[in-house]
Image (cartoon, coloured by chain):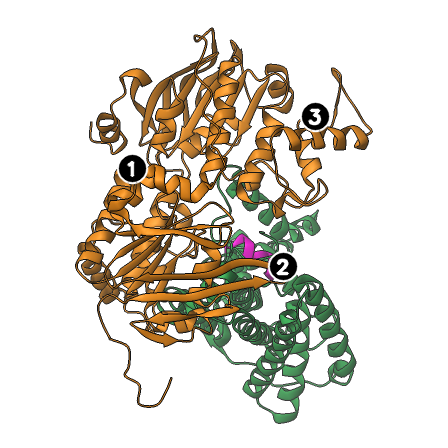
Amino acid sequence: MIVGEEPLPQSGALEVATLGMTMRFGAFTALDDVSIRVPAGTFHALLGENGAGKSTLVKCMMGFYHASAGQMMVAGREVQVPDPRAAHAMGLGMVYQHFTLVPSLTAAENLVISRKDAPAVIDWRRERAGLEAFMARMPFRVPLDQKVAALAAGEKQKLEILKQLYLGRRFLILDEPTSVLTPDEADEVLGHVRALCAAGEITVLMITHKFREVTAFADDVSVLRRGRLVGQGRVVDLTHADMAAMMMGEARLPQPAARSGAPGAPVLRIEGARAHDRSGLKDIAIDALEVRAGEIVGIAGISGNGQMELMEMLTGQRPLTEGSVRVKGQPYRATRAEARRLNIRYLPEEPLKNACASRMSVAENIAFRSFDASGGRTRFWLAPGAMRQRAEELIAAFKVRTASIDAPISALSGGNVQRAVLARELTGTVDLLIISNPCFGLDFTAVSEIRARIMAARNAGAAVLLMSEDLDEILELADRVLVMSEGRITYEVAAANADVATIGHHMGGHA
Amino acid sequence: MNTSDIGLWGVPLAILGGAVRVSTPFLYVSLGEVLTERSGRINLGLEGTLVFGAMAAYAVAFHSGSAWAGVAAAALCGAGFGLLHGLICSLPRVNDIAIGIALMLLGTGLAFFYGTPYVQPVAPHLPAIPFGNWSNVPQVQAALRVNVLFIAGIALALLMAWALRATRIGLMLRVVGDSTDAARAMGLRPNRIRALATAAGGAFAGVGGAYLSLFYPGSWSEGISSGQGLMAVALVIFARWSPINCFWAALLFGGAGALGPALQSVGITQGYYLFYAAPYVLTLGVLIATSSPTQATAGAPGELSITK
């Protein structure tokens, strides 16, 4: 800091700007001469596809990267941000796409220990009173005494935002903050964030893919494509089509396949199934659930209402205490042999963790369903040549972008892992497809492509059970919509008659 | 009536006495290991630290004439071993389990090398508090002679449980043990905190060793530990990384260990060797009974290499 310079303002929203920010990694230019000004107290949206340079830009702003060229301005003054600590000291904060909370600590412990001035001996009674007072000013709350590991994704995201506010940050970067929230929750959270902007408390830069949120909450928008700033303006002057055109350039979105065919015979039937939930204290109770061939049944619900447990019940990871799961009339216990015989496929959430061996190669991961099958028999010796050939075909067919089929699957981006798993699961005859949050954290080219694949599977006669926290996704894909709340199916409606408000009420448990 | 003949009552009494006597080293080593593992590392070298601590305590107590000086020396040596483990493991691509095994062998080897002259001499013992003087039954008196270190160990367990919950250092330790990324994002230095936690854990194990040579069995010999340091490390998993549970687990272990000798003392000679295996059978039984396929091991620090 230059001697005689005035210190930064001590409270209220900060104006932050980048001037000609450029970032090169070797010969690759990830960010090319980007200048964005976010005036104090405004809500600025940053749009762009995956790989457009949004993350690089905000990482330069937060001091994770040192920009190759360009400057940062905070409150109209040029500043150096050598590391995230310096950014925090100026009041700059970020909510990341992946969680930075400590899983085994409670929410209260996470908040208190993240404070710079956490006392050496923590007087929990006083801290609790302080936290309660802070929570009382917030429009949403999280259970303070729960371990973060036991919180659902939506609750964790809320806690991340709460943490930044608790730490008194005055310029907040939000990286796709609503991807795990219901529309109601998202509106609520963003509404509050917007109110804080309007009150001059904070300035916000939000990375997002959702045009609806941009239109509803942001003041200004900047669009990045391949590292360049390709568009900028007041949100009121732009239509969704304008923004999409800026984001995509000439590329065209794959259209979702049209719905065709009528539902056939029941494939999956759950009757009176009971299981313990994650905490072991409450029960998951599915009295009756039926999915028929050629239909998509969507289960909507706020995260943490038993969807994860239902998925585990169907994948055999969670034993039933009562009741039964039947597929095509036969009892189903999710063994490999049964899944193969009955043509059941899965796309669990976080596929890198739940459906892949992350250090094995893309080709090997794609072969998981078939590596030991040879015609109708099991084989002892693998056929590496056939495996590789198959992987190459599927990678081409599903447009999986990978440097090589021998690369570990963990080196792929989220969308490409998802595509690779879909390639594996949707190949061959599929009679029952069980899916959970297939589009979490993906950009919208990937999203519409994956949704088109799911619709195509349905049209080909598969029974599809789709659990998703994204209500728009359910409404787009499902033939029937079910709502899950507190471990139970509480509402059912045909998609044609679905009313978002009614579904929202049931999701919130206020029926 | 012969007061010293109390028949089968001798068995539970001997078990209680044994529990208190035998559990102390388990308690110290497991508390030390809880500290280390909560920071995200495993120190398997505590067996070596225990044996070296026993030798160092005995030697210093013999030369200085003060048992407490021996305890201090054992703690210091233990901290040294712990720090060595912590610093080596801070280097990139070093495996904590492998280093632990190396240090275990180094510790026992050094203890045997420097300890040979102290097998014969007699060093002063640590004081015990005779809680059993109200009774004139010698077995009761023997069972209730409680060593000061045992009581200090209980205090230490309580202190640790409180500190992990309600102090900044305690929370920092848990953050580091659970998520290196989150710790870095918070501006903590995981390697440094882990090295210090391992050093403190080593000091605890050293004190456990001092108890062995200066109270029970109360002399220095090469077979003094017979794997107690390793069992204590297993005990930490059994106790689900909680200091209070460590105390109960140590007591249970001590009691089960005393079962064999107690049965022998009342004249049951057949198959009593089998009862020497009681602690291990007990551990297996409890671990199986408390395991669950649907719930994750509660309390396991996320950065621990065995739970990753």
Q: Is residue B235 magenta?
A: yes
Q: Give the chain ID for the green colour.
A: B
Marks 1 and 3: CB-CB under 8 Å? no
Q: Which residue is mark 1?
A: A183
Of discs 2 and 3, which sits in the foreground? 3
Give the tally of numbered discs: 3
User: Which is the main secondary structure of the residues drawn in magenta?
Assistant: helix
Q: Horizontal and vertical percent for residue A241?
A: 35, 37
Q: Horizontal and vertical percent for residue A455?
A: 47, 21
Q: Chain of mark 1?
A: A
Q: Earlier in the sequence, mark 1 or mark 3?
A: 1
Q: Chain of mark 2?
A: B
In the rendered structure, the answer to whether residue A211 lies left or right of residue B115 reads left
Q: Give the chain ID for the orange colour.
A: A
Q: Going by the picture, which residue comes out furthest to the bottom?
A: B64
Q: Answer whether residue A430 is visible to the viewer in this image.
A: yes
Secondary structure under the numbered disc 3 in the rendered image = loop
- For the C terminus of chain A, which image quadrant? top left
Type of residue at label 3?
Answer: Ser
Type of residue at label 1?
Answer: Pro
- For the N terminus of chain A, which image quadrant? bottom left
Q: Which residue is mark 2?
A: B231
Q: Horizontal and vertical percent for residue A328?
A: 52, 10
Q: Which residue is mark 3?
A: A370
Q: Chain of mark 3?
A: A
Q: Residue at x 45, y 68 (%)?
A: A63
Q: Going by the picture, which residue comes out furthest to the right?
A: A381
